[in-house]
Image: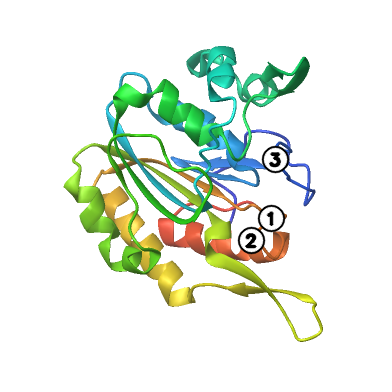
Amino acid sequence: MSAIGGRHLIPYKGRGYSGSVNQNLLWQHGNAYLMDNHRAALWCWQQQLDLRSASHSLLHIDRHTDCLAANLQSHVVAMPDISTTSIGEYLGATVMLGGESHALFRWDNYLSIYLKVFRESVESVLSIDHSDGDAPDHPRVHRPRPDLAPENISYWLSETPTQWIVNVDLDFFFFRTEDRLGNEIWQSLYSNEYVDALFDQIRNVQESGGVRVITICMTPTDFTPGWQECIELGARAFRILGRDYPTL
């Protein structure tokens, strides 16, 4: 798919290492965002709805929960008003820990910060994950089995009649193993049919007006085979969603 309708929100830095804080890519077309580091997702959500005043729910599909609880209160105190913060200011925000300055938003804590700061506006959380990380801290959390997702996403989202944030990390779809010689091998955890059915359901809810914003993170280092495989899977998702995809 061409990149005619979309735009890079930060200069694309190429297929570099992402890690916990490096942001090489942030792309937008309509209400859909693509990134290589998940920490930018919170800022993207704020661009599509007022997180503090607009009642909404969150669908999180990810290998990890992204809800690191360590030092959470220090991060909340240091958090800027993201409704008036540029993407550069957001990515550059810092917090002092142990006398040293650290990036405020990381791939593993942006969601715990969100649930703490905007708790009153979040109607419910639907987290489809691999139980990797701290549990989401919210009174209305549902964590169904991943195998139930493709045929039930539309139903689950329609149960809560609010606007939905859809947040997907492509590391959800891969697993790592070894061959008989001990060499690392990455495999697809789910079939193309699973992927297609999942994003078909998300598209259906979006077309009915139930989805306000979609963020897709590639996580091309550490938890997936790499950039090329993530680019191909991301393109498949964006095609199903009817959104233009960048040339990477």
Q: Tell me the residue at 27%/27% (across/down).
A: 55
Q: Tell me the residue at 53%/37% (across/down).
A: 41
Residue, disc 1: 220
Q: Amino acid at mark 2?
A: Cys
Answer above or below: position of 78 versus 127: above
Give the x, y percent position of residue 206.
31, 49
Determine which of the numbered discs, if any, sits on residue 230 in the image: 2
Q: Earlier in the sequence, mark 1 or mark 3?
A: 3
Determine which of the numbered discs, if any, sits on residue 36 in the image: none
Q: Nearer the viewer, residue 147 or 16?
A: 147
Which residue is at the far bottom?
Answer: 180
Give the x, y percent position of residue 37.
64, 43
Mark 2 vs mark 1, CA separation in Å: 6 Å
Q: Tell me the residue at 54%/33% (across/down).
A: 110
Disc 2 or disc 3, which is closer to the eye? 3
- The N terminus lies in which quarter of the figure? bottom right
Give the x, y percent position of residue 139.
29, 34
Mark 1 vs mark 3, CA separation in Å: 12 Å
**Dot 2, how many residues are within 10 Å of its Cα: few (below 14), some (14-19), or many (20+)?**
many
Q: Amino acid at mark 3?
A: Ser
Image position of 98 (left or right of 215) = right
Mark 2 vs mark 3, CA separation in Å: 17 Å
Q: Amino acid at mark 1?
A: Pro
Q: Earlier in the sequence, mark 2 or mark 3?
A: 3
Q: Nearer the viewer, residue 109 or 196?
A: 109
**Dot 3, how many residues are within 10 Å of its Cα: few (below 14), some (14-19), or many (20+)?**
some
Mark 2 falls on what kind of element? helix
Residue, disc 3: 20
